[in-house]
Amino acid sequence: PSVPVVTIDGPSGVGKGTVARALSRRLHWHLLDSGALYRILALAAQRDGVPLDDSARVAALAPRLNIVFSAAADAEAILVDGVDVTAQVRLETTGGLASQIAAVPQIRAALLQRQRDFMQPPGLVADGRDMGTIVFPEAPLKIFLDASAEERARRRFRQLRDAGKPARLDGLCAEIRARDLRDRQRATAPLQAADDAVVIDTTHISADSVFAQVVDLLAARG
Ligand code: C5P
């Protein structure tokens, strides 16, 4: 309880990761990218030939994985059982697989403790879908970022284009809508703002400005 936590929740492509990373750097706090854990678990199941709908076996994998987030100054890497899976983790298709297993209560429960283990001094910035509602309900500052699906697809499109990867805006928009629907409508830990979250609609504001707002909110609470 003495370790402060800032939670940043919201739908896919809203820029949670960017804001969370910038904030953790500014504060020198730990960072939890909870979506990466769901992505990593889905990839590990595939690696081991475990069908994604065999929830008991997928869940059983969760505590056994050796996961290392290495955050060097410019390059960030994710190692799972010694293998660099950074590129696979970030694939749009992997996000889809993650959202399938994320609908299963048993799998969410299996990842709960792993997520809470990130709560280490001097503090934690955690981004995801249920950071403020389920994983860190005591967090003193909860942010919920939102933006229209079209705008989120445009941001993702620009990211991919800048990385030299071909993409289609209409396809991205459809993927984002499908994932949103699954994340919002599931029975367990659906995507929703905590009652005490500050909701920021980022459709018309830049990442820098969102970051500045969050820093101000934190200063006002601290
Ligand atoms: O945030 P990201 O796109 O990496 O998350 C991938 C998927 O993992 C989401 O679509 C969501 O279904 C699931 N997820 C979740 N709870 C979290 C983080 C991610 O259900 N805290």
Image (tube, rainbow, N blue to C red):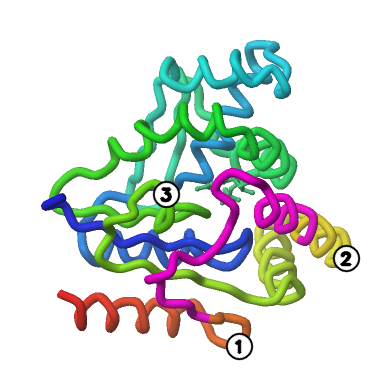
Name the residue tied to disc 2.
170
Label 2 crowd (10 A; few <14 / some 14-19 / many >=20) = few
Find out whether residue 139 is within the magenta segment.
Answer: no
Is 68 displayed left or right of 94 in the figure? left
Residue 69 vertical position relative to residue 189 in the rendered view, above or below: above
Residue 184 located within the stretch drawn in magenta = yes
Q: Quadrant of residue 41?
A: top right
Residue 166 showing in the rendered view: no
Residues at badges 2 and 3 in contact (C-beta under 8 Å)?
Answer: no
Callout 1 secondary element = loop
Which residue is identified by label 1?
Answer: 204
Residue placed at 49% from the left, 36% from the top? 37
Label of residue 149 in the image? none
Rounded to the nearest whole Å, what is the CA distance between mark 1 and mark 2? 20 Å
Secondary structure at numbered mark 2: helix
Find residue 12 and report its horizontal and vertical position in percent: 63, 59
Residue picked out by circle 3: 134
Disc 3 residue: CB within 8 Å of ligand 1: no
Q: Eyeballing the image, is 35 above or below 46? A: below
Is the C-beta separation of discs 1 and 2 under 8 Å?
Answer: no
> What amino acid does circle 1 point to?
His
Residue 55 or 86: which is nearer the viewer? 55
Residue stretch rendered in magenta on the structure: 177-200
- Give amino acid for label 3: Ile
**How packed is label 3: few (under 14 Cα within 10 Å), some, or many (20 or more)?**
few
Mark 1 or 3, nearer chain start? 3
Residue 126: where, in percent of width, then height?
Answer: 37, 53
Residue 4 picture quarter = bottom left
